[in-house]
Amino acid sequence: MSSKYKSLKEECYEANMQLNALDLVVYTFGNVSAVDRGNGVFAIKPSGVPYETLKPENIIILDYDNNIVEGTMRPSSDTKTHSFLYKNWEDIGGIAHTHAKFSCAWAQAQKDVPIFGTTHADHLTTDIPCAPPMSDDLIEGNYEHNTGIQILNCFKDKNLSHKEVEMILIGNHGPFTWGKNAAKAVYNSKVLEVVAEMAYLTLQINPEAQRLKDSLIKKHYERKHGKNAYYGQ
Amino acid sequence: MSSKYKSLKEECYEANMQLNALDLVVYTFGNVSAVDRGNGVFAIKPSGVPYETLKPENIIILDYDNNIVEGTMRPSSDTKTHSFLYKNWEDIGGIAHTHAKFSCAWAQAQKDVPIFGTTHADHLTTDIPCAPPMSDDLIEGNYEHNTGIQILNCFKDKNLSHKEVEMILIGNHGPFTWGKNAAKAVYNSKVLEVVAEMAYLTLQINPEAQRLKDSLIKKHYERKHGKNAYYGQ
Amino acid sequence: MSSKYKSLKEECYEANMQLNALDLVVYTFGNVSAVDRGNGVFAIKPSGVPYETLKPENIIILDYDNNIVEGTMRPSSDTKTHSFLYKNWEDIGGIAHTHAKFSCAWAQAQKDVPIFGTTHADHLTTDIPCAPPMSDDLIEGNYEHNTGIQILNCFKDKNLSHKEVEMILIGNHGPFTWGKNAAKAVYNSKVLEVVAEMAYLTLQINPEAQRLKDSLIKKHYERKHGKNAYYGQ
Amino acid sequence: MSSKYKSLKEECYEANMQLNALDLVVYTFGNVSAVDRGNGVFAIKPSGVPYETLKPENIIILDYDNNIVEGTMRPSSDTKTHSFLYKNWEDIGGIAHTHAKFSCAWAQAQKDVPIFGTTHADHLTTDIPCAPPMSDDLIEGNYEHNTGIQILNCFKDKNLSHKEVEMILIGNHGPFTWGKNAAKAVYNSKVLEVVAEMAYLTLQINPEAQRLKDSLIKKHYERKHGKNAYYGQ
């Protein structure tokens, strides 16, 4: 594989394999992409290829208008959602989509995941948003492209920043997450799944459970992400 | 093992071992068969043999009237359900039966699994049917044969096609799934289990959760199975 | 290890290791024994020894009056429950006790596990009994011996046979299971845990779920255990 | 690594790795420390370092005033909670903190874990306490130090002894556990998680489930921890 996109393909491949290792997908129900901003292209998993047989050289390279730049296989059926987000959010480096069970259950319940504890607040300061299902004309049109529009509209309606909230649930469908690179997007998929499971259990134990109070949200977020952050190396 | 059914036995063996690898069975609570339409026979797991000791040469070959064509062991106790379905649905190539926990829980609850999301709609466009438990005379008669009748009656009553809906729950019992071959039947058992778990979780989070709307069901099913499908290679 | 009880110790050791392999215990929260009727002794796990370091030669041999016949370690703290059952039920060959989570949850809920499906009916024809917690004087007296009395009283009160029902829950404590040998006792612990989980899920999906009807209970039990049984080899 | 704290670092390292092996953490969401009372120092995990790359020589040594004695990395962000507890409870030897899911769910529900059965009573005789979330001024002040104050206040308010109850939940956050050494602290984290899961399941099966009665609590605790204890070797 002598390609100028070799390292991009490898980053994308490794992130897709992590999705599988972290128990976030069964069969081929998920996909991760990674972007190369300098060359204006992104790498994505080929559609329907099992993880056991996936190889770095199977990864597809496309531009933001969904033209294939390199690769012989058909890209993920969700490709147009990825390209739409890369075009609109110029500072993200990777995107992940899964059908992980707790994330999907909240999406199917059409509920935001409430911020109940510090595991959640270590990563974001708001509920995890659930976008409503799309209108029929958006579904029947350019569906995957319009999924991207739905994500942007939800962030606009709820006044959220994609730099602070790196995850969303699409109602009746499942999660999309993103980050500075593909590995961080996958990390966010795992965090979302863990937080979604804890929130589910919390409400089973106490249906009247209260959201985390503002001072604690702020404290936990700041110690990890604030300008005086002291978490990590 | 020099047998004209060598490859059929191996297909059947591999599919049974997958059942185990996919965490769909404990002990011997499940069985898979594979059919050879040209020779008018099918292969099935021997009854009560643990997966750790199962070998391809243990697989039993029978005709559609349940006569043993090859094999020294007793076939699965559910054999007559398999033969009945092969006789009546001439276009299926494999059948799987498990006691997977979420599938069985819905069967024991005697509820169809509602279509709540795209994970479900990627595979079928209706609720997953749950056949009512059999009448006493059917149970006391030729039970496993009559289980096949119960399946066909349920599909007739609900106006379903076995080519579009490749799975069913038998009330108070558990799931049967089928497909073009044994591997696809096992795949459908896993999909059913995943969808059954997600639907369970969805209702725990929101007891008023709504079914997926028609436009979205159609979109997801068509992109994977329609004449302009663009999922997979 | 040259001992006349070498094979008994090995049977007991293997069964204890299975408990661990089948995910029925954490740490040392469980124990299995095996009996040698000819010599009037039984073998049991030493108390509090982790499975990672347990060896066949650590197994303790006792008579039915709890005198140590062979072995240098202290036997399981539940030993007197085992000896009591061996003394009173002369046809059983092994006993297992675990703190498996779904079994314990039903015991803590002080509820019999209802017979909801064929997975249950393949093994027994009644609900799985939950004995009430013991009276204070039985607890403060010879506790583990009295646990045996509690088990026998429960079977008498509910008119159950220990040859047909090889499992019980002790209220607020957990399960005891038995069988023709130690391996069968462990098998029954796993079956109980699986059936307890399915029953829990069934009631979550449908709180009004109905017990399996009599004809189906009889059919499934007979095909596996009746005189014309056709399950297994 | 030639250091006078070599064995302390190794004890701390092994305990942190156990947290991971026992499925109590994802990513870096947890930390364990071990104390050396003779030298007046403790060892703790460096902040945000993944378990796959963690090495014994990365472990940080600090005194009880949080001064780094040895180590080049930044210690766990929760370090001040550990030092506060070591200073105030002079007889403990190790502390563990996790974000295990059932423990966190009870913490997020702000509920004590009721003592429902003998699995719980084998380890402590009271409900597992859940401290209320801190007041805003404590949160905005020296947060991790104040988490220690919150723990001590909760034990004082509920009249509990840290020698008998080696675990607590911090409301909306998660569990802290301790013990005679780091391994025992980790053991207590696992016990708490198991007991928290069983209590959750118990209430799902029977919302009216009753606490274990006093005689049984006493019996089980005494046989393992009383002066005539007969559990273990």
Image (cartoon, coloured by chain):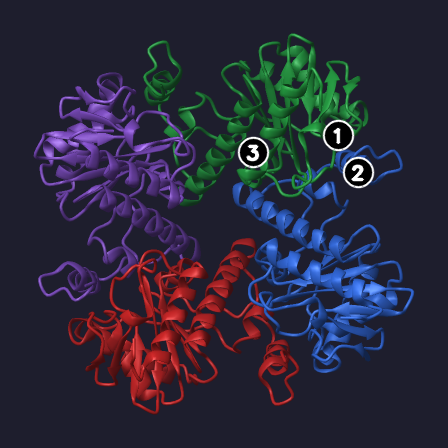
Chain colours: A purple, B green, C blue, D red
Q: Is disc 3 placed on a helix, strand or loop? A: helix
Q: Position of residue D122 (x, y in %)?
A: 57, 74
Q: Amino acid at mark 2?
A: Lys
Residue that label 3 marks:
B18
Q: Is residue C14 left or right of residue A21?
A: right
Write the residue at 27% across / 69% down. D58
Dots 1 and 3 on the same chain: yes
- The CA span between labels 1 and 2 is 9 Å
Residue that label 1 marks:
B77
Q: Is residue D117 visible?
A: no
Q: Chain of mark 1?
A: B
Q: Position of residue C123 (x, y in %)?
A: 75, 45
Q: Amino acid at mark 1?
A: Ser
Q: Chain of mark 2?
A: C
Write the residue at 37% across / 79% down. D7
Question: What is the crowding at mark 2: few (fewer than 14 residues within 10 Å), some, or many (at least 20)?
Answer: some
* Residue C224 marker: 2
Question: What is the crowding at mark 1: few (fewer than 14 residues within 10 Å), some, or many (at least 20)?
Answer: some
Q: Chain of mark 3?
A: B
